[in-house]
């Protein structure tokens, strides 16, 4: 009896090896939703802290001088999904966290529609300080902050990078593209040692103004949900 069970187990193990069970299991898109683990390596924590300090210590930056708080990140630094917005608004400046105002509430709903939440993704912005009167960041400001966000992406090392809106898209992809043509496509891109899959979708603040476009954002969200990483 014991012998029969042992040989059955060995056969089962060999079968799992044959079908490469671990690979199939790990490649399932749904697996990314299982982990809520925030514990990051000392090296990653140190690099994030160093980057934050560098931005906090910027000299001659009128954005920083006019802002109440740096808005550096929210969410899970271990996540395979990183979201990038434009720049903080008044609520974000007050709280020191990205996407906590009306646009943030819609972003939370968008994430919830594909079974995600802030504990399962990582969120930052192209610019870390609120531009006065919520104006768009200038080309010069974007150019100045670009090395920081590039480094930020490299440290987080996401498998999926979601660019929310045209400011994030233009900063990361270039100025010659328009969001109506670029959204809803996977683009492979490297940031230093990080090789990632970029997808562009509409900014939640734009969707609040143009709710008819939510159906396009839903297509993009489903692409994120179903991406095998
Ligand atoms: N809009 C953004 O792009 N980022 C925020 O953090 C808030 C609103």
Image (cartoon, rainbow, N blue to C red):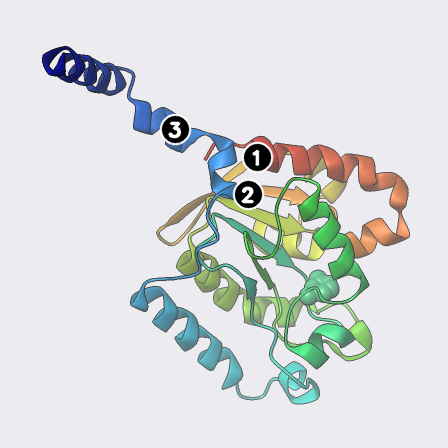
Q: Earlier in the sequence, mark 2 or mark 1?
A: 1
The answer to which quarter of the image holds residue 114 is: top right
Q: Residue at x 65, y 56 (%)?
A: 168
Q: Nearer the viewer, residue 176 or 205?
A: 205
Whether residue 203 is visible: no
Q: Earlier in the sequence, mark 2 or mark 3?
A: 3
Q: Position of residue 170 (x, y in %)?
A: 65, 53
Instruction: Locate the N terminus and report the quarter of the image it occupies.
Output: top left
Mark 3–mark 1 Cα distance, whole angstroms, equals 23 Å
Crowding at mark 3 (Cα within 10 Å: few <14, some 14-19, many 20+): few
The answer to which quarter of the image holds residue 217 is: top right
Q: What residue did someone put label 3 on?
A: 25
Q: What residue did someone put label 2 on?
A: 198
Figure check: 136 above or below 8: below
Q: What residue did someone put label 1 on?
A: 186
Q: Position of residue 37 (x, y in %)?
A: 43, 55
Q: Position of residue 86 (x, y in %)?
A: 68, 62
Asked if disc 2 and disc 1 are in contact, CB closer than 8 Å, the reply is yes
Crowding at mark 2 (Cα within 10 Å: few <14, some 14-19, many 20+): many
Whether residue 114 is visible: yes
Figure check: 28 above or below 42: above
Foreground mark, 3 or 1, reads 3
Foreground mark, 2 or 3, reads 3
């Amino acid at each position: 009896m014991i012998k029969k069970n042992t040989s059955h187990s060995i056969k089962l193990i060999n079968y799992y090896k044959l079908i490469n069970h671990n690979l199939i299991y790990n490649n399932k898109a749904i697996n990314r939703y299982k982990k809520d683990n925030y514990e990051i390596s000392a090296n990653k924590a140190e690099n994030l802290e160093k980057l934050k300090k560098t931005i906090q210590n910027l000299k001659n930056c009128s954005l920083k001088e006019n802002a109440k708080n740096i808005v550096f990140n929210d969410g899970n630094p271990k996540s395979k999904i990183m979201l990038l917005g434009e720049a903080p608004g008044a609520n974000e400046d007050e709280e020191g966290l990205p996407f906590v105002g009306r646009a943030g509430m819609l972003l939370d709903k968008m994430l919830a529609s594909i079974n995600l939440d802030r504990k399962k993704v990582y969120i930052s912005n192209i610019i870390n300080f609120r531009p006065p009167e919520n104006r768009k960041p200038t080309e010069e400001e974007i150019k100045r902050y670009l090395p920081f966000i590039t480094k930020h992406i490299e440290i987080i090392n996401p498998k999926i990078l979601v660019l929310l809106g045209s400011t994030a898209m233009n900063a990361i992809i270039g100025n010659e593209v328009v969001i109506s043509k670029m959204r809803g496509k996977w683009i492979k891109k490297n940031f230093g040692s990080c090789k990632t899959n970029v997808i562009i979708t509409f900014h939640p603040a734009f969707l609040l103004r143009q709710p008819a476009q939510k159906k396009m954002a839903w297509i993009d969200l489903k692409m994120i949900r179903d991406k095998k990483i």
